[in-house]
Each structure stands twice: as C-alpha cells, then as structure tokens.
Image (cartoon, helix red, strand yellow):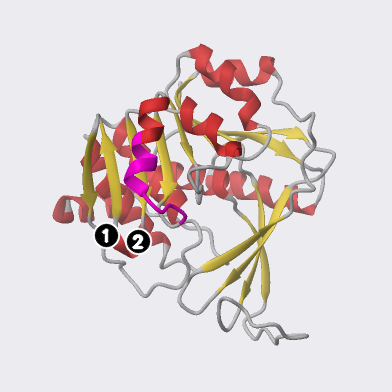
Amino acid sequence: MTDVLVLGGAGVDTIVRVPELPLPFADSYPIDTGVHTRAGQTGDFVALGLAALGLDVHHLDLLGDDPEGDLVRALHRDHGIALTALPQPAGTKRAVNLVGPDGRRLSLYDTSRARPGDRFPDDVLHPLAAAARHVHVTITQPCAEALPLLRETGVPLSTDLHDWDGENPYHEPYALAADVVFLSAAGLTDPERTMRRISERGRARIVVATAGAEGARLLADGELTHVPPATPPAPVVDSNGAGDAFAAAFLYGRLTGADPERCAHYGALAGAYACTVPATRTDAIGRDGLLGEGAVTA
C-alpha cells in the first residue's frame, strides 16, 4: 500500500532573483545570478518532502511531451518517487518566480497549460487512491473534478489552499472536501474566522494557517492554538516551497501517529529548513533532521 498519493501540482519553475520586490518598472534588469529553470511545483515539493521522510509516495498528474515534462520525470526518477504521468497536449505546467533578497517571491503562473475538459480517468485515479493511506490534493486543474470520486473511496484527504483570500469560489470545493486543510494567513484579514468557517462548513477536523516567521495557527477539533516558528538552521534565502515542506512534514507526523500539535511542530521545522534552500535546488529535510530537532523544540 502507498502511504500518500499526491494529486496534481507537477511542473517547472523559472527562478529569477531580483534586486527588490515589488520590482520598480524598468526596460530591463541585469540578472547576475542567472535565470534558472528547474522541476518543482507544489505537488512535486510535497512528494519530495514526504519521500525524504521515508514515506512511500505516488504522484499523479498530467504532463506534456516537452522539455518541461522531461525535467519533472527526471526529478521523480532521481528521488525514487513513483510517477504516473498522463498526456497533456497543452504542455507541462510552468511558472516564473521572482525572488527578492529577503527570500520573498512573486509567482507568475502560466494558466494556458490546462484545458477545460481535462480529467483524471476514473480507472486510473480510483485504484491509486484506494491503494493509498492518504491523498494530498493540490489546487491545480483538474483536481477539483476528482474530489467526488476521492471522497467515495473513504481515503483521508488533505489540501493546501495557499494564499486563498477566504472568498474566491475556486478554492471552496477543496476547502470543504478535505479532512486536513492548509492555507497561508497572508491573504486573510481574519484567519481564525476563515479557519473556523472551513471547519464548520466542510469536513476538516484540522485547519492550519501558516504565517511565516510568525509561526502558524492550528485549529484541531475546535481548539485554536499558536504554533511557534522554528529557527532556520542556516540563513534564509528563499521562501519558495516552505508551505509544501510544512504540509509534507505535518502529514508525516499524522501518518506516524503524532498528535496535531506535534505534527504542526514538524511542519514548522520543515518549513524553516526549506527557507534555507535556494530556489534553484530541490532539497527537503530528512527524518533524522526532523526528529532530532523536533525532539528538542517541540
């Protein structure tokens, strides 16, 4: 049996380090650090984080027959992560990430690489989900259309709403279908209100709102607690992938029997570690690093 099926979120990012964010208008900027393209979007990073912690992971998504798709396939092959790649004639998902000196980022997503009729075939999705202990659903298309079938399997679901503002209807099917919901507090005027609304209207017994250097809020079975941030083990260079690392480590804790607060501490440690990894690399905290530090800080 697979520990976690990761659904969607496979693609490539082009990383551009810029002198500041927001970037003032100019005809051109010299980029002395170079412009780098590497595999790794939200689903890839969650799968990588889970695999680095020793879990058996399978990733399912649509990929193009293109150089970007080749990079994604190579990433999974190099890290021993099982990948089922269905053909995507529109091409592999891609984005451009502008990264400031403090590690903050601005992401530009190419939404042309999806089609309204895209679907995960039931005869592919159902057996993979039924053979998993847990399914993590990214909010990339066409994952929303897969939610009813996933719920029918009875497998626990998680999702990451990223920078949801609490109102955009696109995110609601994910928010209401998952048992564990992650999101960023950055775009919320009242994080607690949004977290409780997710729990009251949907299935989630656990909702986590991450807040970077301020830590995170954890709503578990109706009780709201603050999770302190972890100290990064090296200088912070890039926040890209920190939320995915948090989710992966949290799910590792959940699948190994840890209580929600311990899971959130694992997430904070993994997220802090991710902030020390340059965006041009794909790396994740391992089990020894997580459990060794977690035993001291949590």
Magenta stretch: helix, strand or loop mostly: helix
Residue at image point 21% right, 34% down: 259
Can residue 74 be seen here? The reply is: yes
From which residue to which does the magenta span run? 187-196
Viewer-side residue, 109 vs 125: 109
Residue 236 covered by magenta stretch:
no
Crowdedness of circle 2 by 10 Å Cα count: few (<14), some, many (20+)?
many
Residue 82, located in which quarter of the rendered image?
A: top right
Residue at image point 78% right, 33% down: 116
Q: Nearer the viewer, mark 2 or mark 1?
A: 1
Residue 272 is labelled as 2
Residue 48 is labelled as none
As measured in the structure, the alpha-carbon distance from the residue carrying label 2 to the one carrying label 1 is 8 Å
Residue at image point 60% right, 53% down: 40
Q: Which residue is mark 1?
A: 229
Q: Position of residue 87 (x, y in %)?
A: 79, 34
Quick check: 225 above or below 231? above
Q: Position of residue 235 (x, y in %)?
A: 37, 75
Viewer-side residue, 172 vs 246: 172
